[in-house]
Image (tube, helix red, strand yellow):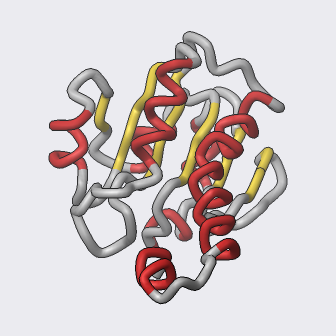
Amino acid sequence: MIAAAKDTSYDPELLEAAVRVNDGQPERLLGLPDDHADVRGERVAVLGLSFKPGTDDIRNSRAIPVIEGLQARGATVVAYDPVATENMRAHFPDVEYADSAAAALDGASACVVCTDWDEFAALETEFDAMATPVVVDGRRVVERRDGLTYEGLTW
C-alpha cells in the first residue's frame, strides 16, 4: 500500500507510522518478561512459530525477532509449533524444539505466545508445570487466570 500511495504522489505518513509501530512490537513484547523474571540462563517457551495459524510458513513470523531477542538476553529458548517446527529449525538449529506446548512449558520461567493457534487457547493446567508462570501473549489467545502472571499485547 505504501508503494502504491507513493506512486500516486500521496504521502503515506499514517501507513508508515503503522508499519513502525508493528515493527517495534517484538521489542516491546520482549521487555514484558523482564518486568516479572530475569530470563538470563532461564528456559523460555516460545509458542507459535508460523506467521499465522494454519500454515508452516515462517516468513515474517514474529517468532523470529522474539527468539533472537531472547537469545540475546541469554535465555534458553524452547519452541513449539504444531506445523512450522521444521521450517524454524532450519533458521534456528540451536533452539530446543518441543513435541507439544506442554513439553515446552515444563520448567519454563516464562512463555511468549507468538501465533494464535487454537490449541494455545485451550491450555490451562499446562501452565502449572512452569517454574514461574509468566505468560507474555503476543496474540491475546491465552485466558487470564489466577496463579498466572499475564501480559497481553496484540500485533
Q: Position of residue 79 (x, y in %)?
A: 38, 39
User: What percent of the width, then of the height, locates residue 125?
Assistant: 60, 53
Horizontal side of 108 relative to 97 (left or right) equals: right
Please, is residue 100 above or below residue 82 in the view? Answer: above
122 relative to 36, above or below: below
The residue under the point 56% across, 30% down is 108
| The image quarter in which residue 81 lies | bottom left
- Pick whichever, 37 or 52, lies toward us: 52
> Which residue is pictured at 69% across the width and 75% down the height?
14
Q: Which residue is located at x 57 percent, y 53 percent?
A: 23
The residue lying toward the viewer, choosing from 1 and 79, is: 1
- As drawn, which residue projects farthest toward the front? 9
Q: Residue furthest bottom?
A: 8
Residue 154 is left or right of residue 113, and the answer is right
Measured along the vertical axis of the image, is residue 81 above or below residue 45?
A: below
Identify the image quadrant of the C terminus. Answer: bottom right
Q: Is residue 130 or residue 36 the one in the foreground?
A: 36
On the image, the x and y values in percent for residue 127 come to 61, 46
User: Residue 25: horizontal and vertical position, in percent?
Assistant: 64, 52
Q: Quadrant of residue 84?
A: bottom left
Residue 107, quarter of picture: top right
Q: Residue at x 27, y 21 (%)?
A: 94
Count the labels in the image.
0
